[in-house]
């Protein structure tokens, strides 16, 4: 009895959290992240890698289904359903035929050829890993062997989970004694709902597991639902556009499937990356603290502001500040503040104290540098201007080598 009540309480809290998202600020954040992180170029890179890796991934999936005869009868149905659900109807049949044809030929390759194909598939998942960790501003990645194990398990277990889901759906339809089929559009609605849920769940699991940092399940699910809804809307809009404006078919003829597929893969990756950016910045959005607009040289400026805050905190009873306290006071996202703190810690100007008490307090950051004697030059070199042949004279005539942090922080 307690578990259903707890689940209901968590669901209610999660729905309230969704309702409290400031969508205007969220859209502004997504636009800013799309520009600064160059997500458009990243989506183009992922489109190319995905196109190359489609055949290896389909080959692995076919091999997995072959190894488990219990899913063999669902293989063709599953492939057709997934392609028609995830790809616009205009090209679904052609894409399915091409993938099966290529995968069938790939299965006859030798060891060297299969190694190259599998390496291509792993290149895709490693690219996804690097991209998502960059969105979350993760600096320390998982060990290579651990990443290979995780993603290989995902590539091989994914088809089995899809087959199991379709098996459960087929069993539910068969035991409903015609009730589902008898409802107008009932079976299609059930399959569409299952497809939407699987896309949302798969995306949420990706956002939760891939970044090498802590991500809340509730936030990952918000990102997953955003991506699933965006993909469904984009698929229908693209299908309507292609039916009303047959430009590709008129220009490319029978070859039109290829550019349409590329456009769709690019669109899908843009939606996925926007969903990842939304998930990464949800903690800041839900705090309700107005965001600052940071211009050029923001790392240098933010570093000085952090040093000034920690200097004031050192003189107080707190002695230090948590990441949450600093980001709220500075009105910046954790993804911006954490790299600055790491850079300051690398200079031994800031230290992090890991603390745990009965209230579950987190770590505090404390000031290690003496502002009266520490010069500004190292921070200038790291965040603004590195000395080289062109800037050597500028560094020679500048006063940064003798300017202390205290002088730099003084207000007239």
Image: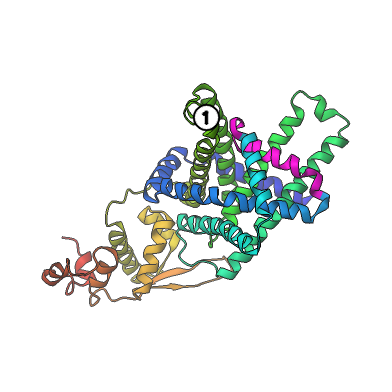
Quadrant of the drawing holding the C terminus:
bottom left
Q: Residues within 10 Å of mark 1 (few under 14, many from 20)?
A: few
Which residue shows up at 10% across the image and 70% down it?
397
User: Is residue 290 something one can see in this rendering?
Assistant: no
**Element on which disc 1 rests:** helix
**Nearer-the-camera pick, 232 or 127:** 127
Q: Main secondary structure of the magenta part?
A: helix
Residue 343: in magenta span = no
Residue 76: in magenta span = yes
Q: Is residue 5 left or right of residue 284?
A: right
Determine whether 155 is above or below 286 in the image. below
Q: Position of residue 351 (x, y in %)?
A: 40, 74
Specify the segment rendered in magenta: 71-91
Determine whether 317 is above or below 267 in the image. below
**Nearer-the-camera pick, 322 or 114:** 114
Q: Position of residue 279 (x, y in %)?
A: 52, 49
User: Would you identify the image quadrant in which residue 391 lies?
Assistant: bottom left
Q: Give the residue number, with chain letter if any, for mark 1.
A: 253
């Amino acid at each position: 009895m307690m578990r259903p009540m707890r689940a209901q309480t968590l669901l209610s809290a999660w729905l309230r959290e969704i309702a409290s998202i400031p969508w205007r600020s969220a859209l502004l954040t997504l636009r800013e992240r799309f520009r600064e992180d160059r997500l458009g170029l990243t989506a183009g890179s992922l489109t190319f890698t995905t196109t190359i890796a489609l055949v290896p991934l389909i080959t692995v999936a076919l091999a997995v289904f072959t190894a488990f005869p219990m899913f063999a009868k669902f293989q063709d149905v599953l492939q057709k359903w997934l392609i028609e659900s995830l790809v616009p109807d205009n090209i679904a049949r052609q894409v399915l035929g091409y993938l099966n044809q290529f995968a069938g030929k790939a299965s006859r390759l030798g060891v060297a050829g299969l190694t190259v194909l599998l390496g291509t598939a792993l290149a895709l998942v490693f690219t996804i890993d690097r991209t998502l960790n960059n969105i979350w501003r993760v600096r320390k990645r998982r060990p290579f062997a651990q990443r290979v194990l995780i993603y290989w398990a995902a590539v091989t277990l994914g088809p089995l989970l899809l087959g199991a889901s379709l098996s459960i759906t087929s069993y539910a339809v068969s035991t409903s004694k015609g009730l589902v089929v008898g409802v107008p559009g009932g079976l299609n609605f059930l399959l569409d709902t299952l497809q939407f849920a699987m896309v949302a769940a798969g995306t949420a699991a990706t956002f939760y597991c891939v970044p090498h940092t802590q991500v809340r399940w509730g936030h990952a699910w918000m990102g997953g639902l955003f991506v699933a809804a965006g993909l469904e809307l984009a698929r229908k809009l693209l299908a309507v556009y292609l039916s009303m404006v047959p430009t590709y078919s008129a220009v490319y003829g029978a070859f039109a499937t290829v550019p349409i597929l590329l456009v769709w893969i690019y669109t899908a990756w843009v939606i996925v990356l926007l969903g990842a950016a939304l998930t990464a910045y949800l903690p800041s959005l839900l705090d309700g603290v107005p965001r600052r607009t940071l211009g050029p040289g923001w790392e240098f400026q933010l570093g000085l502001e952090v040093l000034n805050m920690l200097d004031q905190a050192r003189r107080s009873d707190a002695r230090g500040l948590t990441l949450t306290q600093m980001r709220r006071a500075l009105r910046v996202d954790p993804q911006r503040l954490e790299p600055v703190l790491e850079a300051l810690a690398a200079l031994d100007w800031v230290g992090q104290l890991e603390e745990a008490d009965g209230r579950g307090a987190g770590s505090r950051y404390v000031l290690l540098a003496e502002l009266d004697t520490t010069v500004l030059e190292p921070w200038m070199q790291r965040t603004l201007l590195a000395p080289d042949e062109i800037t050597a004279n500028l560094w020679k005539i500048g006063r940064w080598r003798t300017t202390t942090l205290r002088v730099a922080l003084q207000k007239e």
